[in-house]
Structure formats: C-alpha cells, structure tokens
Image (cartoon, grey):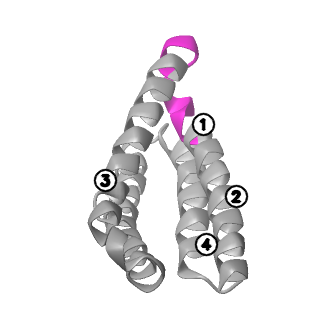
Amino acid sequence: MGDKRIIFAVLFVVVSLLLGFTLHFPWIGIVVISILCVFYSSYGATTQIMFLDIAQDKYPTSVDLASPLNSIFANIGISLGSVTDSVIAGITSINNSGYFAAIYGLIAFLAIWEANHLYQKSK
C-alpha cells in the first residue's frame, strides 16, 4: 500500500505487543513507554495535516470543521483506552495492558486500511 499511515498503525501494534512483554522489567518497560510517547506525538501532527489536506482538496468549506476532528477523536480514543485498561487491570494485571492495546492497534490498522482504500477509490 505504501502509505505512511499504515506504518504508524503497524508500529503501534508492534510496540504495544512489546509493552506487554517488557512491563515485567521496569527499565525496559520505561523505554518502550517512551517510544510509544514519541509515536503518539509524531502521529498526531501527521494526521492533523492529513485531515486538513483532504478537507482543503475535497471540501474547502469544511476546513474549520476538519481542524478539531483529530483532537476530538484522540480524546475519545484516550477515554476508551483508559476505561479498557482500568477494567483489564482490575480483572487481570496491569502487565497485560500492552496486549489489549495491541488489539486496539490492530483494529485501528484495519480501520485505516479500509478508510485509505475508500479514499483512494474516491479520487
């Protein structure tokens, strides 16, 4: 597919799986969490630019609406992840949160794949 958005989704899945394995070792877990933080900050800027570019090209009158979409959906994702992680930590252990984060990463990968497919077809 050759799209940068797919690379971010795959990296989230891989690093989240690594997080599940490395949380048993505190210093390695801290390094993996730091890598996740770098990915999250890099991802936010690129998706914001992508939303604005699509809005500018396809729907020029909706640029003002497209601008806050990234932060809105990021906050929804953070809330959903926090609720899921608190339930997981209550049922199993906090060390398993990386595995469940990888499931969300896989869902995001599939959603990005399908959205990109639909976007490319609409061009």
Q: Is residue 34 visible?
A: no
* Residue that appears at 44% across and 85% down: 57
Q: Determine whether label 4 and label 2 are within 8 Å by CB.
A: no
**Mark 4 surroundings within 10 Å by alpha-carbon count, few (fewer than 14), some (14 through 19), many (20 or more):** some
Q: Which residue is mark 3?
A: 71
Marks 4 and 2, the one that precedes in the sequence: 4
The range drawn in magenta is 89-98
Query: On the rendered image, what quadrant is the N terminus found in?
Result: bottom right
| Mark 4 lies on residue | 6
Q: CA distance from mark 1 to mark 4?
A: 19 Å
Image quadrant holding the C terminus, namely bottom right
Determine the CA span between mark 4 and mark 2: 9 Å
Magenta segment: does it hold 41? no
Name the element at disc 3: helix
Q: Earlier in the sequence, mark 2 or mark 1?
A: 1
Amino acid of disc 4: Ile
Identify residue type, mark 1.
Phe
Q: What's the amino acid at mark 2?
A: Leu
The quadrant where residue 114 appears: bottom right
Q: Earlier in the sequence, mark 3 or mark 4?
A: 4
Between the C-alphas of marks 2 and 1, the distance is 16 Å
Q: Please state the horizontal and vertical placement of residue 97, each as a whole percent of the image.
A: 52, 34
